[in-house]
Amino acid sequence: MSDRGPLRRHRFIGTTVALAATLSACSGDEPPEKAYTVPGSLCGIAVEPALVKAVLPGGDSLTPATQKPNGGTIRCNLYVDDTLVLSLAQAWWSEGKATAAVSPAYPGTKDGTMSEDERFIYSGEAGVGRTVPSCKTSEHPEQDLYTAVETRDTGIDDPEAIEKLLTAYTKAVEGSAACREPAAGS
């Protein structure tokens, strides 16, 4: 009987070590699940949900909120589990400014990659895009409309995903009411 005691303890310790190894492998290696659904329109701009989800962290709920910090900027902030994680913005800047001159206002674009046509600059965390020259309104004469995509302390660092979202978001803004005169009487 005395020979079984150490054997039982050895099996118990071995089982405990195996269980602990299994639990640690499950908890830290995989990113948290993205249990929320991204809508097809964020703050009035239609954007492909998969492009947005690619730059978001895991979590249970996603909440968009529109912010207008001044007369020329509209920001669509996205919150995952009540934490700000992504901001999509439209901002009017003086006509003729180069994207490279606007991008320093968005710190995440520092050391970013410039597109060949010089309309977009992006990094793994943020990007700025210039809309087409025909995007004009009487509310913002002699100004050009820029877009911005900025992640917020999410650990996301994916230049390709930021570039795809920035390009799609800019094209969606160009096709929206932001680039057209309001209808008479509205």
Image (cartoon, grey):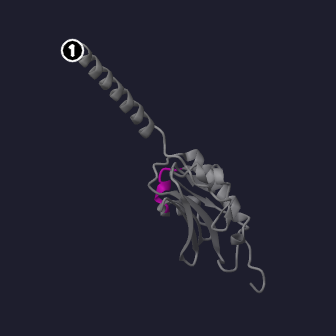
Q: Can residue 105 be seen in this view?
A: yes
Give percent across and percent down for residue 58.
51, 50
Q: Nearer the viewer, residue 14 or 135?
A: 14
Q: Is 1 or 30 nearer to us in this picture?
A: 1
Please state which of residues 35 and 172 is positioned toward the viewer in this rendering: 35
Residue 148 coordinates in the image, percent (x, y): 57, 61
> Is 121 on the left or on the right of 23, as rendered?
right
Tally of marks: 1
38, above or below 23, in the image: below
The stretch in magenta equals: 106-112
Q: Closest to the observer: 137 or 55? A: 55
> Which corner quadrant of the image does residue 177 belong to?
bottom right
* Residue that appears at 47% across and 62% down: 82
Q: State left or right for residue 98 relative to residue 175.
A: left
What residue is drawn where x is 36% and y is 26%?
15
Q: Residue at x 24, y 18 (%)?
A: 6
Write the residue at 74% across / 73% down: 180
Q: In this view, does 156 lie above or below 102?
A: above
For the residue marked with disc 1, what is the amino acid?
Ser
Image x and y of residue 120, in percent: 61, 55
Question: Could you say which quadrant of the image residue 63 lies in?
Answer: bottom right
User: Does residue 29 lie above or below 61 as drawn?
Assistant: above
112, above or below 186, in the image? above
Q: In which quarter of the image is the C terminus?
A: bottom right
Question: Tag 1's secondary structure?
Answer: loop
**Can you identify the residue that label 1 sits on?**
2
Q: Where, quadrant-wise, is the N terminus in this rendering?
A: top left
In the rendered structure, the answer to whether residue 177 lies left or right of residue 15 reads right
Residue situated furthest left in the rendering? 2
Q: Indicate whether residue 108 is drawn in magenta.
A: yes
Residue 100 x/y as whole percent: 55, 58
